[in-house]
Image: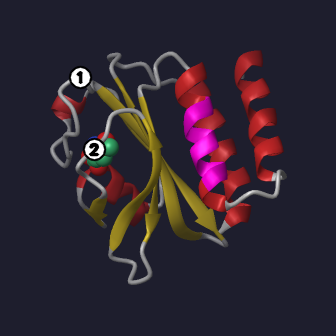
Amino acid sequence: MKTELKQLLLKIDSSISSGTTRSEILLNTCKLLKENVYHYDWVGFYLLDEQNSNLILEVFDGKTTEHTMIPVGKGVCGQVAESKKLKIVQDVSQEGNYIACSIDVQSEIVVPVLKDGKFVAEIDIDSHSPSPFTIDDEKFLTSICQKLSVLF
Ligand code: SME
């Protein structure tokens, strides 16, 4: 993993141990990622509701979206809530089960946060670049989600 990404992981560690609220830590993470990674244009966290039926947008950095509640199974976000597996869509125009937020978005990555093997939340990242995501994004974001799982 690139040094810049490793440094961001350290900043997220400090944020987690800062003693502030979960929501603030998640928001800090969104800002840190959007500001420092060129191909991350919208970064948000959706949390699973108590009925396990909808994802609720908790915090985000980027353009406002009307998709603040997404049913499990719907869109890329809803698919990840069901499968509990990271999903990369390198070209959103080729994805059948996709909820469009902005015409500028070309690609998306969604990574689950698992607590004791149970899906509790996910990080959703939209990009204006075509096919930008690599194994480095997978490792980096998976590591972030593992770290954040202590907050749930
Ligand atoms: N594109 C997502 C919806 C959320 S927005 O990207 C903020 C999806 O297909 O689930």
Q: Magenta stretch: residue 71 in it? A: no
Q: Magenta stretch: residue 28 in it? A: yes
Q: Quadrant of the C terminus?
A: bottom right
Q: Quadrant of the N terminus?
A: top right
- What segment carries the magenta color? 24-32
Q: Which residue is mark 2?
A: 65
Q: Which residue is mark 1?
A: 104
Please tell me whether mark 1 sits on a helix, a strand or a loop.
loop
**Residue drawn 62% across the image and 41% down it:** 29
Rendering coords of residue 97 (x, y %):
19, 49
The 10 Å Cα crowd at callout 2, few under 14, some 14 to 19, many 20 or more, is few
**Residue drawn 38% across the image and 63% down it:** 56
Which amino acid type is shown beneath numbered disc 1?
Asp
* Image height of 76 relative to 74, above or below: above
Please tell me whether mark 2 sits on a helix, a strand or a loop.
loop
Tell me if residue 140 can be seen: yes
Tell me if residue 44 can be seen: no
Q: Quadrant of residue 136?
A: top right
Mark 2 residue CB less than 8 A from any atom of ligand 1? yes
Which amino acid type is shown beneath numbered disc 2?
Thr
Q: What separation in Å lies between label 1 and label 2 (alpha carbons)?
A: 13 Å
**Position of 14 compared to 84: left or right?**
right
Most frequent secondary structure within the magenta stretch: helix
Residue 60's label in the rendered image is: none
**Position of 22 compared to 86: left or right?**
right
Residue nearer the viewer, 51 or 1: 51
**Position of 152 compared to 102: left or right?**
right
Ligand 1 placement by image quarter? top left
Rendering coords of residue 132 (x, y %):
42, 19
**Residue drawn 49% across the image and 54% down it:** 122
Q: Quadrant of residue 31?
A: top right
**Residue drawn 42% across the image and 75% down it:** 49
